[in-house]
């Protein structure tokens, strides 16, 4: 079983208690860093067509972390996946990469 550290933020607001927990899976973060630094996600290895352009690639160790990422970044993830223009999608990808660098495996924005 892997060690997973976490940071819990608890706040009281309008008589309600909010608990926001951020998980840090150190083994997964180290793996993503190794992938990012190795250059194994080159364009040829990803199966991208010759006219496509890869700007950013995210890697999530677990589905739970992916769902937390979607929940914490609703506007930027919607623009990233469903943006009307390329500038909207690139801008959202840039903001997501800056907010969550531990999930970025390749970036060129």
Image (spheres, rainbow, N blue to C red):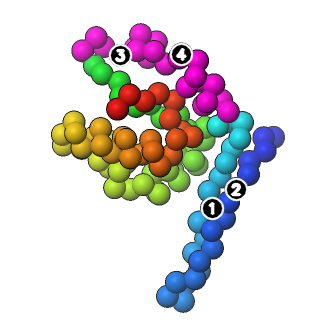
Mark drawn on residue 107: none
Quadrant of the image containing the C terminus: top left
Report the span colored magenta. 30-51
Residue at 59 percent of width and 66 percent of height: 20
Name which of mark 4 and mark 2 comes first in the sequence. Answer: 2
Mark 3 — residue?
48
Crowding at dot 1, Cα within 10 Å, few <14 / some 14-19 / many 20+, comes out as few
The residue tagged 4 is 40
- Does residue 23 lie above or below 13 as drawn? above
Q: Residues within 10 Å of mark 4 (few under 14, many from 20)?
A: some
Image marks 4 and 2: residues in contact by CB distance under 8 Å: no
Disc 3/disc 4 C-alpha distance (Å): 14 Å
- Per the image, the residue denoted by label 1 is 21
Q: Which residue is mark 2?
A: 6
Residue at 50% of width from left, 35% of height from top?
Answer: 104
CA–CA distance in space, label 1 to label 2: 7 Å
Judge left or right: residue 85 versus residue 42: left
Quarter of the image that includes the N terminus: top right
Mark 3 neighbour density, 10 Å: few (under 14) some (14–19) many (20 or more): few
Are the two marked residues, 1 and 2, in contact with CB atoms closer than 8 angstroms?
yes
Sequence-wise, the earlier of marks 3 and 2 is 2
Q: Quadrant of residue 7?
A: bottom right
Total marks in image: 4
Q: Which residue is located at x 30 percent, y 22 percent?
A: 53
Specify which label sits upstream in the sequence, 1 or 3: 1
Which numbered mark, 3 or 2, is in the foreground of this view?
2
Q: In the image, is 33 to the left or to the right of 106?
A: right
């Amino acid at each position: 079983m892997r060690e997973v550290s976490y940071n819990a933020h608890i706040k009281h607001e309008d008589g309600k208690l909010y608990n926001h927990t951020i998980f840090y899976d150190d083994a997964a973060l180290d793996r993503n860093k190794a992938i990012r630094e190795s250059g194994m996600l080159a364009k040829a290895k990803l199966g991208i067509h010759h006219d496509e352009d890869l700007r950013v690639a995210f890697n999530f160790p677990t589905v739970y972390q992916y769902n937390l990422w979607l929940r914490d970044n609703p506007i930027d993830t919607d623009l990233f996946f469903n943006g009307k223009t390329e500038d909207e999608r690139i801008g959202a990808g840039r903001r997501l990469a800056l907010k969550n660098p531990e999930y970025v495996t390749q970036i060129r924005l």
